[in-house]
Amino acid sequence: MPPNDSAPIATAPEAGGPCILAIESSCDETAAAVLDGTRSLRSNAVHSQIDIHAEFGGVVPELASRSHILMIDRVVARALREANITLDDIRGVAVTQGPGLMGSLLVGIEYARALAWARNLPLAPVHHLEGHLYAPFVGLAEGSAEPGWPFVALVVSGGHTALYHAKSPGVYEELGRTLDDAAGEAFDKVSKHVGLGYPGGAIIDKLSVQGDAEVFAFPRPMMRSKDFHFSFSGIKTSVAHALEKEPTTPEGQRLNDLAASFQRAVVEVLVHKTLRAADAVHVDRIVLSGGVASNKELRRTLQIEAAKEGKTVVLPPPALCTDNAAMIGAAGYARLYQSILANEGFAQPHLAARPSWPLGKRSPLQKPRQRGVRRGPKS
Ligand code: KG4
Ligand code: ZN
């Protein structure tokens, strides 16, 4: 059942429940994980395709799906081995149904469907972004805060940048999203522009530590708009203009300063909008997820600014921020658990990939307010 339409689901059990296998292949990571409770991770195998796509400066869909086909069986075998179990111990399968690249999604879906069919196991299709919302629920790192419901989630990656009001399990409202580039995409494009590698986020993050963020004045697009949407293509263009004015391609300290100034602009917008979105829905718990959530300055700034306002930030460890199957398993576990308890078997003869698939409904806060507009008599 798609998460958008599902009724709230009961909280799944802690460690020691039946083992499930989760599979994720929506973009350029082939991933499989074994969980035995929403928060109990037995293994988390991820094969990244960065080496394949790096020379093209971005993900090449055809190469991505070919690599998924080659790797998926090996990655699943690794997840089972590291969990110290065999397929006989698996009682249910969760798989990413969308959104993502069609060819990549199909590999994970068909693999999961064939496995579930052959072993008569229940299969739970999972929304990739719901998976990101569940990242902080996976194998809670010691000392990290309990996420709890409701919360506001900033999902920020190479393909997505959006704010959600996560009201309860399965009930989500989209508060806003990027109107052009995702934040990670902006990191990647800027990195490419200044001759750094792909993906650019982690490289810019590292250079920024040595840089002065006040040196270049980049804009903060839509920071003061009254909605919760984002726009990052303008910052990217400003970086290009700044580079044109430089006598030579910046390197050394100048490059560090450019990286730090760009990163500061992105982080300030993300943090500001997230805190205002939390205010708008009267929620004081914030979850940060997606590849860009590994960014050190974003993590630090959001925590500092949220603390000033008495809000709590829940940060998954970086390995669970980037794409992985553990988060897909955590999101699918409760639904699978109910099927396992009811002794249900395979019931998904057809499962279509959903490359574009919004998570939840749009929040009523997204409707533009029309102030001072009076309805006149019909003419
Ligand atoms: O979630 P993810 O693994 O894949 C999807 O895009 O769905 O995110 C990858 C993105 C890339 O754009 C990458 O540059 C960015 O996350 N990223 C970072 C950092 N680590 C990864 N961006 C900023 N700072 C980082 N430390
Ligand atoms: Zn993702």
Image: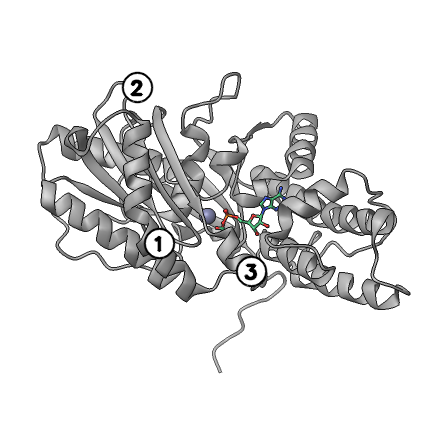
> Where residue 378 appears, x then y in whole percent?
47, 78
Q: Which residue is mark 1?
A: 68
As drawn, is 257 to the left or to the right of 93? right
SS class of the residue under badge 3?
A: loop
SS class of the residue under badge 2?
A: loop
- Residue 198 is drawn in which quadrant? bottom right
Three-letter code, disc 1: His
> Where residue 209 appears, x then y in whole percent?
76, 38
Measure the C-alpha gap from mark 2 to mark 3.
45 Å
Ligand 1 is within 8 Å of the C-beta of the residue at disc 1: no
Q: Which residue is mark 2?
A: 15
Q: Which residue is mark 3?
A: 368
Residue at 75 percent across and 45 percent down: it is 264
- Name the mark on residue 126: none
Three-letter code, disc 3: Pro
Three-letter code, disc 2: Ala
> Where residue 261 appears, x then y in whole percent?
79, 49
How many discs mark residues in the rendered view? 3
Give the crowd class for mark 1: few <14, some 14-19, many >=20 residues within 10 Å. many
Look at the picture and state if 315 lies above or below 255: above
Disc number lying in front (1 or 2): 1
Residue in the foreground of this view, choosing between 156 and 203? 203
